[in-house]
Image (cartoon, grey):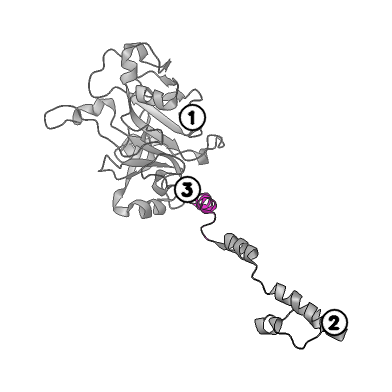
Amino acid sequence: MKRLIRLSKPMPTTASSLCVPASPGLVLGLVLGLVLLGCQPNTTSQAGSATQTSPQASPTTNAQSLNDTAPAAPVAPYTIAANGMNGMTPTSTLADVQKLFGAAHVKPGSFYVGEGVCSPATAVYPNDPAKAFLIVWLNQPQPSAKPYMLVWDLPDTETWEELKGSHGAPVMPTSQWHTPQGVRVGSTVADVELANGKPFKLYGIDWDYGGNVTSWEKGTLDTAHHGRLRVRFGPPPTPIGDTSAFSGDAVFSSNHPAKAMKKLVAYRLTYDMIPDERPLDDALMPQQFPCETMPVPTSY
């Protein structure tokens, strides 16, 4: 009985101690038979273990895991969107802008508000139409000032004559900046209507606030940008026909029957850097001065 008690303890782990009998006897013979049976290889257990530990057992699961943890695709450069702007944010200061774009490419400027009034601004890449844009600040571009809006602009229709090619043909400058929907300076009303997914409303042309979009009518350009994207249209440098049917201080649909409407081009895009629900406080509005006291307007 003492032998049986001894053998009921945890089995030895070496083959020699398990498989060689210590002495003859009926009891020991029975025990030896059981031990020899335990010495047989457990192929089922080994196979199951190999299946569980094989690195090739679940390639689909591994691929799904990689996809789940992969970082989001970066926003393309020169994208006009809240997560774009080449690093510009609502808290960027003038010093931040100089670091992002290089101090040599950042110059003082002004933004023409209308009726002879301008706001202080900063021109970025002012000599490169493909990259140029304007920053209008809250309370001037002081060290702690924050951006109010960003502006991508072309000269007003009165200065189109200055944009001549080598053969005297009018030239439409192109900008690398664009929205994810493809809207950019130079896009036509037809292009923008397609990007919006439906017609929109805009002021008639030929006055101080002419051509400004007044409502996206809950289209894509409204929902995708939370109401922060604004576009202003005007006639291109080449003739488009009679525009008198949608001129003046009135609101028109982009789906106006006059064919010339669809040929108007976007010559200004602006993006609000602070929400529209901001309090109507003078401290949260750009300062305005007579244009003759400001640097020559870099945006009309």
Instruction: Residue at 27% x, 25% y: name it.
Output: 157
Q: CA distance from mark 1 to mark 2?
A: 84 Å
Tag shown at residue 257: none
Instruction: Residue at 43% x, 36% y: name it.
Output: 271
SS assignment for the magenta stretch, majority: helix
Q: Dividing the image into 4 quarters, which one contains the C terminus?
A: top left
Q: Please state the horizontal and vertical placement of residue 73, each as a whole percent of the image.
A: 44, 47
Q: CA distance from mark 3 to mark 1?
A: 24 Å
Rate crowding at label 1 as few (under 14), some (14 to 19) or many (20 or more) other CA atoms within 10 Å.
Answer: some
When asked about the image quadrant of residue 263, the answer is: top left
Q: Is residue 299 left or right of residue 163?
A: right
What segment is highlighted magenta in the picture?
55-71
Tell me, yes or no, if residue 10 can be seen here. Answer: no
Q: Nearer the viewer, residue 145 or 56?
A: 56
Identify the element where label 3 is drawn: loop
Residue to which mark 1 is pinned: 222
Residue to which mark 2 is pinned: 5
Instruction: Residue at 55% x, 52% y: name it.
Output: 61
Identify the element where label 2 is drawn: helix
